[in-house]
Amino acid sequence: MYYAILWSYAAYRRLQHCKLLRRAESPRRSAATILILFWMLRLGLTSAWAQQTNLPNKPDSLHFAIIGDSGTGGREQLEIARQLVAYRKVFPFDLVLMLGDNIYGGETPGDYQKKFEHPYKPLLDAGVKFYATLGNHDDPNQRFYKLFSMNGLRYYTFRPKDGVRFFALDSNYMDQKQLDWFDKEAGASGSEWKICFFHHPLYSSGERHGSNMELRKALEPLFVKHGINVVLAGHEHLYERLKPQQGIYYFTSGGSAKLRRGDIGNTDLTEKGFDQDYHFMLVEIYGDQFHFQTISRAGKTVDSGMIARTVRKTVTAAAQ
Amino acid sequence: MNRKIRQLIFPNIAQYLATAVLLCASGLAESPAAADANLKEFNDRVKKYVELHKRVKGDLPAMKPTTDPAKITVHEAAMDAALRAARSGAQQGDIFIPALQPYFVQLVRSELKGAAGAKAREMIKDGNPKVEGDPAKISVKVNGMYPGDAPLSTVPPGLLRKLPPLPPELEYRFVGRHLILRDVAANIIVDYIVNAAPQG
């Protein structure tokens, strides 16, 4: 904080020598000065906040970031992208999960450029890998876009580190084939951490959409059966950490470029909610601990905590 | 005939007739063998379409994961153009054969109707281009392009379990209340059933 104020003051002093500012008449100069001071302070504070993470930041743990409903190409997406870049300096993550609605509107090459490649260029240049899942605004042909790491598949699984397996599902079209695939893959996985991510939340206090009961009916029994630990979804343009449901931790993070301010309704599902600004998440999996930090566009931490992995027997095992 | 007896019989005949018409319309009056034959016909037509899709795809450079989004759009456009040309005479009902349409309507409505189907009805509005997109941009017609900037409706898993399964080249979607058959790679409407979903 001290450095932020000092940096802002230094920048302000330097700007005082600006010719245009000196030429301006006095009331106009005061207004401009106040405005400049405000922005300098804001930038300074932002950079100060960017130095703070509550995560253990161990070198041998898995670091990743999460963005949802991000592909607008608008100012807010760029601001969140800037925060991601700033945070990566103190929390070096190598992968980003995308929770759907990766490219809103048109999907021309220009759209890919504007709504993905340009905002995240510093991360892409640094070798950060993005793993996408399809939202209702995404053409399924996005699966052929190499930078989304879907390898031509609408749903897929990957294991970035021993003991951690991700399942990316297509919640727009949960047919029996996909359910059977997930049942088989999750059942075969011996990873300690099994994390699912897809677009539509099974539990949500969002007033716009709310919990997707149909998907819940289809997926929750499989999540319980295979001991899924954490489920990440977007779609609702807000942040919500839900109270564990049947031992599973659910997060909704769909505000990385779209925001529905004040949309979190009064339900008994919410453990922590944030619907006042855009956000993204940082996660670190360290042994049996899942540490998370949710950060707003201004660089402010709006939620953080740790989930300890609990060993849950699968339904099959319990029956034996 | 005694007036009282006439009053008893005629309204009942009318009711029986109305029920029979409804049953015929909904496909329930069909014998199981006829229903099976219709379903087989649908599956055969789907298979035939997929053969055409694969043939067209085989004539184009293979679509592999790429860092160049232009290749994705070019491939989609080429698939679209080739399939449209190959099916230039295609009409509504070529795949959703008329004899089977009531069966589909009945399946969709049984899943979406009433209070029990309220959540599923909400789900098909989610991403539905007539609800969330620009309704003017999409017109439902065979070989019509599904606009690239329009969202896609979510299809309830319970309904997908009941509908005849499709190969990965095709998918069921909703545009407004219409059930469409969409070619995933070419982004075109292959066939449709008008107002398959209930109102509300």
Image: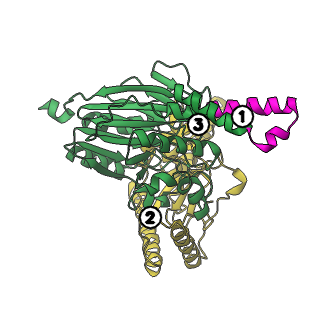
Chain colours: A green, B yellow
Q: Residues within 10 Å of mark 1 (few under 14, many from 20)?
A: some
Q: Which mark is residue A253?
A: none
How much space separates mark 1 and mark 3, taking CA atoms? Answer: 85 Å
Say what amino acid the circle numbered 3 marks: Asn
Mark 2 or 1, which is nearer the eye?
1
Which residue is pictured at 46% across the width and 22% down the height? A270
**Residues marked 2 and 1 touching at CB (< 8 Å):** no
Residue B160 in view of the camera: yes
Q: Main secondary structure of the magenta part?
A: helix
Mark 3 or 2, which is nearer the eye?
2
Secondary structure at numbered mark 2: loop
Secondary structure at numbered mark 1: helix
Say what amino acid the circle numbered 2 marks: Glu
**Which residue is labeled 1 in the image?**
A36
Which residue is pictured at 23% across the width and 34% down the height? A287
Quadrant of the image occupied by residue A245: top left
The reply to whether the magenta stretch includes residue A15 is no
Q: Measured from the top left, where is residue A189 in percent x and y? A: 22, 45
Q: Is residue A237 left or right of residue A186?
A: right
Same chain for labels 1 and 3? Say yes or no: no
Which residue is pictured at 50% across the width and 24% down the height? A273
**Which residue is labeled 2 in the image?**
B169
Say what amino acid the circle numbered 1 marks: Ile
Question: Relative to B165, is A31 above or below?
Answer: above
**Which residue is labeled 3 in the image?**
B12
Which residue is pictured at 22% across the width and 45% down the height? A162
Q: Which residues are magenta?
A: A17-42
Question: Relative to A153, is A176 above or below?
Answer: above
Q: Measured from the top left, where is residue A173 in percent x and y? A: 45, 49
Which chain is home to disc 3? Answer: B
Q: Is residue A201 left or right of residue A258?
A: left
Mark 1 or 3, which is nearer the eye?
1
